[in-house]
Image: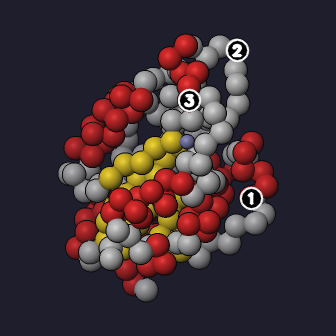
Amino acid sequence: MNKAVFFDRDGVILELPKGNEAYGFIYKKEDVVIVDGVREALHALKGRGYLNVIITNQPVIARGIVSYEDVVELHEFINRKLGGLIDRFYFCPHHPETHPDVPERALKYRTVCGCRKPAPGMIIKAAKDLNINLKKSWMLGDMVTDIAAGEAAGCKTIMIESLANSRVPKSGNAFKNDVKPTSKAQNALDAVRYILEK
Ligand SMILES: [Mg+2]
Ligand SMILES: [Zn+2]
C-alpha cells in the first residue's frame, strides 16, 4: 500500500490573495503564487516514497464564477509550475447553500455532498483510487475543516498557520473546538520536515 501527504490548496500550496486573505478565491492563472518551499517539500516527499495529493474545496464552481473544466485546467497549470510533483488533484465543486444569483450552469453543484471538507469524501476516494494506507498518511491544512476531514478519514494531521485560521467557516463552526491536529507548523515545508523526521 502507498502512503500519502494530502495538502489543502489555498493557503498551503498557494499564497492567499494579498489584501483579501480571508475570503479571496484563486481561479485565475495570474493569481497563482506558489508558497516558498513547497516545491522542495513535494520533492522531498517523493524521495521518501510519499504520494502528493491535493484535497481542495472549490465552491467557485457552485458560485458559477468558473466551470468545472476551468478548475481542471488551472490544476494542470499549477502542476506544471510544481514540476509535476502532484500525483493527483481532488476538488469539491459543490456548495450546500442556494443563492438567487447562481447561473444556470452552476445549479447542479448547489447541493449537500460527501466531498466538501470537513467531510472526508475526497480523502477516502483518493485512498481507494491510489491504494493509500490512511493511517500512514497526513492531511495538511490551514483551516479547522481541513483538520476535521483528515481526522475523519483516519489520517494524522498538521495545522498550518495562516491568516485563514482567523476565518470562521460557516459549515465548520461545529468543528472549531473539536479538532486536535497531530502537530502545528508555520508552513508546508516545516510540516513536511516534521513528517520526514518522525
Ligand atoms: Mg486553505
Ligand atoms: Zn462536494
Where residue 33 sits, quadrant-wise, is top left
Which of disc 1 and disc 3 is earlier in sequence?
3
Which of the image's four quarters has the N terminus? bottom left
- Residue drawn at point x = 36 percent, y = 73 percent: 3
Return the x and y of residue 165 as percentages of the image width and height: 65, 53
Q: Is residue 76 left or right of residue 53?
A: left
Other residues around mark 3 within 10 Å, as few (<14) / some (14–19) / many (≥20) = many
Other residues around mark 1 within 10 Å, as few (<14) / some (14–19) / many (≥20) = some
Q: Nearer the viewer, mark 3 or mark 2?
A: 3
Picture disc at residue 100: 2
- Residue drawn at point x = 48 percent, y = 59 percent: 123
Q: Nearer the viewer, mark 3 or mark 1?
A: 3
Where residue 121 sits, quadrant-wise, is bottom right
Return the x and y of residue 10 as percentages of the image width and height: 49, 45
The residue beneath circle 3 is 109
Which of disc 2 and disc 3 is earlier in sequence?
2
Residue type, label 1: Phe
The residue beneath circle 1 is 175
Residue type, label 2: Pro
Which of disc 2 and disc 1 is earlier in sequence?
2
Could you give the CA–CA distance between mark 1 and mark 2, rounded to whole angstroms? Answer: 28 Å
Other residues around mark 2 within 10 Å, as few (<14) / some (14–19) / many (≥20) = few
Residue type, label 3: Tyr
Could you give the CA–CA distance between mark 3 and mark 2, rounded to whole angstroms? Answer: 14 Å
Whether ligand 2 has any atom under 8 Å from the Cβ at mark 2 is answered as no
Q: Is residue 133 left or right of residue 104?
A: left
Could you give the CA–CA distance between mark 3 and mark 1, rounded to whole angstroms? Answer: 24 Å
